[in-house]
Image (cartoon, helix red, strand yellow):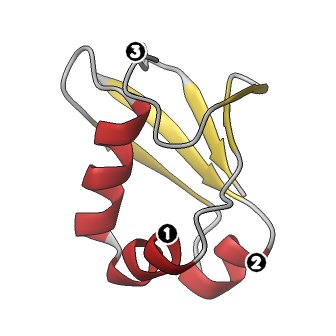
């Protein structure tokens, strides 16, 4: 399924990326998404390890970072800051 991932604040500056469309498996959780993103972006993986105070929004609603219970749906917009 396709989702849109947006990066804001310092993350977008560090990654040099404001957004990307990703193809992820159905029933991907927020935690699984971060594992996928960590493999795509080594810098993001290192930031998450050091600074676990990342804010995550799905369709403009804040969700717990690294949640194993929240599923991402097709065409969701995930914002990370």
- Label annotation for residue 10: 2
Element type at marker 2?
helix
Element type at marker 3?
loop
Q: Nearer the viewer, mark 2 or mark 3?
A: 2
Q: Which residue is mark 3?
A: 74
Element type at marker 1?
helix
Of the pair 41 and 69, the residue shown nearer to us: 69
Q: Earlier in the sequence, mark 3 or mark 1?
A: 1
Q: Which quarter of the figure has residue 59?
A: top right
- Mark 1: few/some/many CA within 10 Å (<14, 14-19, 20+): some
The answer to whether marks 2 and 3 mark residues whose Cβ atoms lie closer than 8 Å is no
Of the pair 14 and 29, the residue shown nearer to us: 29
In the displayed structure, would residue 1 be above or below residue 78?
above
Location of residue 22 in the rendering, given as x and y in whole percent from the top left corner: 35, 43
Q: Which residue is mark 1?
A: 48
Say which residue appears at 38% left-offset and 50% top-offset. Answer: 34
**Disc 2 to disc 3, C-alpha distance:** 27 Å
- Mark 2: few/some/many CA within 10 Å (<14, 14-19, 20+): few
């Amino acid at each position: 399924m396709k989702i849109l991932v947006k990066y804001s604040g310092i993350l977008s500056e560090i990654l040099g990326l404001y957004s990307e469309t990703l193809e992820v498996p159905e029933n991907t959780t927020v935690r699984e998404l971060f594992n996928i993103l960590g493999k795509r972006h080594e810098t993001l993986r290192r930031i998450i390890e050091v600074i676990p105070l990342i804010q995550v929004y799905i369709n403009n609603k804040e969700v717990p970072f690294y949640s194993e219970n929240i599923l991402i749906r097709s065409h969701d917009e995930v914002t990370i800051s």
